[in-house]
Image (cartoon, rainbow, N blue to C red):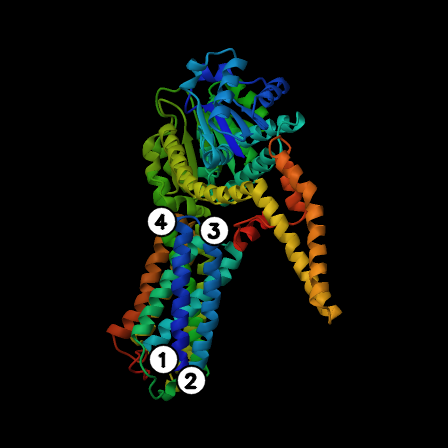
Amino acid sequence: MTTHILLFKITLIAYFTATVLYLVNVVIQHDKSGKFARWALFGGIAVHFGNMALRFFEVRYTPVADLHGSLSFFALCLVVLFLLFDLRYRLPVMGAFISPLALVMMIFAGISHKPLLELNPVLDSWWFPIHITFAFLGNAAFSLAFCAGVMYLLQNWMLKSKHFSALYYRLPSLDTLDKINYSSLTVGFPLMTMGIISGAIWAESVWGTYWSWDPKETWALITWFLYAALLHGRLSIGWRGKRAAIFAIIGFCCLLFTFLGVNLLLSGQHTFEALGG
Amino acid sequence: MNILVVGLSHKSAPVEIREKVAFSPTAMAAPLKQMLELPDISEGVIVSTCNRVELYATSREKEGAISRLKDFLADYHQLSRDDLDEHLYDYHGEEAIKHVLRVASSLDSMVIGEPQILGQIKTAYGYASEYKTAGVILNRFLHKAFSVAKRVRTETAIASNAVSVSFAAVELARKIFSTLDDKTVMLIGAGEMCELAARHFVNNGVSEVLVTNRTFARAEKLAEEFQGRAVAFENFQDQLHQVDIVLSSTGAPGYVLPAEKLSEVIRLRRNKPMFLIDIAVPRDIDPRGNKIDNIYLYDVDDLQGVVQANLKERHKEAAKAEAIIEEEITQFQQWLSTLEVKPTVISLRRKLEDIRQAELQKTFSNLGDLGTKERKSIEAMTSAIINKILHKPTSILKDAQNNSDGNLYIDAVRTLFDLSEPSVDPQDKKKQDND
């Protein structure tokens, strides 16, 4: 077993531990386990960084070209962004939604792990890490918006139907959830925009054209328009609450399709095969 | 030494009995002194509230002392013991410790988690210290009970959800708005519950209060009380879009606020959420209003439902509190068991013997070439010193166990000579120190 696989496994265990602890925290309202869960995530990202760095030095390029690397990098961005966000909001119940999401990504990353192949020369560019860092941080921010949206719908349902489950007591107020939704959107949207722009510049430098309507680009643009519509709705027509939450969830589904569906179901220059992964 | 509890509470006796055995808070000296004069009772505390009357005592024996405490309770209030007996409960040993810890933590209260009982026990303890009827054991025990109650309060959510309808409304508002600081409340009509809820809202940060009433003078009067603004009943609907929280309790036979009006208002508010509380029966606000997005409409039954859910949540938390109490019982019993004379004398001897051995070793190795005879006589001398020193304290301790100061001496000896408490494993000890 090479070191990077070992580190990957440790990361997986750390995220698993965090998930269990966050669930314990929410189900029986055990405050300390929320704190331990945060430490598990901190430990997890440290090892995760190590894993990415090792893979980088092993193959001498940003190791996000295959499905394994992309999922793993997505999970890393998600956890990093959540921890940053947690510094401000201190919401362990959000961890109970985020860490399982990161865990699932890591499990699929683990399943899809393959030895790294020869690099497609296209990827041998500084634009590559810049492009994916913007794109994946944007994805992570939209994942936060998605989780906040799901939490909003749950809390809204409980307040409307007057069924008060244990979760009602743990979830924050509708107002807080709506604010989280909005702030993740304002973080995610510029990041995604930068991701698309840097991708276009990079495309120009290797293929001589900024935009070639490959399926990934098309779907990214559709997702971008969805989030742009949501942002516009919020800023100028007073969209909020339930509608914004539903929109954030639809946006996330679209984003997942852009990220996974396009690569796995459609073909184009963004597929992992084309990228040599 | 046994801790004894004799008493009755809302669970065992109706109010007709409870009021007969209650002790007057202005005259606690007499009953406390009488209680201590009972044979074989060495310490005493009397807790008397409207929901419970309990005697806490320590004694060398159990059944006899318990019976005498029951007699005392009956005699003092001129009741027959037979009438009282069916309502009385009694506990000793671990059960007694558990009972008092549960009472202090408000697990035995009518409304679980209510905060008053702790204060009442503190008052009872205050009387007992004033009249010097609480000794080493009850002192330590009640302080333990206070710290356990505090732990339960901070480590569980037993007291965190409202159990009154008016306060439940405030908590619901917090689940919708997060902060109430910049929110506006409108009172429609004047009902007692409405006013109470409004007061809770104001105390929790609501910045503006509007009041409307069919009789404008009443609206003005109430508005003055809340330093708010009176609004004419004819056009209160025009102001609704500035209002975040509505409290309604008019005597109107039909709906004062139709659902159609509410959709219009929410549009004017650009979907900013609104929380409406309809306390009136028959209801003031069209219940279809709750179907509109961003409108949260609660009637009296809904609020009752919230209170029920909150109580259920408190009961769930109570299980956590019970676990904390179990943990603390063990700790306290360990301390209690050190208050026995025999083990104290043994550990005191062992302590001195250890010191003697260590010092002998040091001396012998310093002196070097000593003959067997010299060594023997040095050993004999040191041993004699210890015996002479220990003779008097040992006999005093043995005599003291038969009078009420006994525990005081034992505790003092343990503290002065730093005798570790037997069978306390290091982890528990550490925890105790952190308390």
**Nearer the camera: disc 3 or disc 4:** 3
Instruction: Farthest residue to the front: give it.
Output: B373
Q: Are marks 2 and 4 on the same chain?
A: yes
Contact (Cβ within 8 Å) of mark 3 with mark 2? no
Q: Name the residue nearer the viewer: A175 or A228.
A: A175
Q: Are marks 3 and 2 on the same chain?
A: yes
Lower position in the chain sequence, tag 3 or tag 1? 3
- Point out residue B128 in the picture as x, y percentages from the top left corner: 62, 27
Lower position in the chain sequence, tag 3 or tag 4? 3
Q: Which residue is mark 1?
A: A65
**Nearer the camera: disc 2 or disc 4:** 2
Q: Amino acid at mark 2?
A: Tyr
- Point out residue B32 in the picture as x, y percentages from the top left corner: 60, 22
In this rendering, position of residue B266 left or right of residue B128: left
Q: Chain of mark 2?
A: A
Lower position in the chain sequence, tag 1 or tag 4? 1
